[in-house]
Amino acid sequence: MRYDVPPDLKGGHMKSFAFSTIKGGVGKTTLSIHTASAFADAGRSVLFIDLDPQAHGSLALGLEPAERPCVGDTFGPRAKHTLKDVVVRSEKRENLFIAPAVLRMAAMERDLYHWGYRLEALSRSLDTLGWQPDVVVIDTPPSIGPYTEAVMHFVDVLVAPVPTGAYALQGLTEISNTWKQVRERGGQLVVAVNMWDRRTSATNEAMEQALSEITFPVLKTRIPRSEAINQAGLAYEVVFDTARTANGADELKGLAKELAKVAGVPSPVRRRTTGTKRGASAFAAP
Ligand SMILES: Nc1ncnc2c1ncn2[C@@H]1O[C@H](COP(=O)(O)OP(=O)(O)OP(=O)(O)O)[C@@H](O)[C@H]1O
Ligand SMILES: [Mg+2]
């Protein structure tokens, strides 16, 4: 085992959030790494599961590019590793744990098509972790293959980020149809607006009209288009660590707070020593 999980981080009320669209470059990774970091800063034990073989989320949360055991190795009839074997602890946030992706997961995904348990891949993998985080946050590839299907089958809240602009809602119908087919019970599908720009009034008017026609909930929090968020992404960092008062940082915290309410995440346990007081109070019970 590569880390020790303190007994008071072992959770027990696990809630899970995933970010998924078939449209690329809309903010799945950006929103997922900031949601994971915000929950960790609020004192919760968080497991970030990177299911995108591009591995941008793993890198942005501080892992060096390297060939290593990955979350894909915990799936399939001949899984090579338990989840406990592949999870690493963040060096920046002691209650944030990362189940990393690596590029070879792109080819490994094909092997899952013929696996009878592929929809249960994530719950079976989590059974091999040996403890329960408070919060699981999952990043997915821009596609609906076995990884995304397994996520949809498992997750409590599926967030589809939509960018502000042309083709914003492209692919949402496909996500929603697959969600309905794959879900056996419960769960919620919600839309999160990203790259919102108050100045582009004509675009925003068209966007409001399009959003009003979506048949599932649109989160109130809108993440602005922010140079600080983009710069943090270029540096493989989260904006809370590079420019915590910059445009967009509060909204990213607000997104995690709103998601906590949607899923009914209990407020953090006070005795935990990790996370800042400011962050923890932002997550006071809804
Ligand atoms: N609110 C924002 N403001 C400014 N830049 C943003 C914002 N959200 C995301 N970006 C930038 O847009 C680019 C795409 O974002 P991101 O990688 O999160 O998208 P993605 O949906 O995960 O992409 P992919 O489909 O390739 O996985 C990145 O360079 C990121 O830094
Ligand atoms: Mg991504």
Image: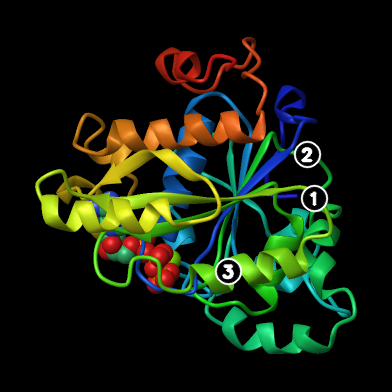
Report the Cα–Cα distance between label 3 and label 1.
28 Å
Q: Name the residue under label 2.
A: 132
* Quarter location, residue 282: top left
- Compared with residue 238, is residue 44 higher up or lower down, i.e. above or below? above
Q: Name the residue under label 3.
A: 175
Disc 2 marks which amino acid?
Gln
Q: In which quarter of the image is ligand 2?
A: bottom left
Q: Are marks 2 and 1 in contact (CB under 8 Å)?
A: yes
Instruction: Give left or right: position of 84 versus 220.
Output: right
Cβ at disc 2 under 8 Å from ligand 2: no
Q: Where is residue 32 in the image (x, y as percent from the top left)?
A: 48, 51
- Compared with residue 257, is residue 192 higher up or lower down, i.e. above or below? below
Disc 1 marks which amino acid?
Leu
* Quarter location, residue 44: top right
SS at mark 3 in the image? helix
Instruction: Give left or right: position of 267 versus 131.
Output: left
Q: Where is residue 47 in the image (x, y as percent from the top left)?
A: 63, 45
Instruction: Give left or right: position of 136 versus 203.
Output: right
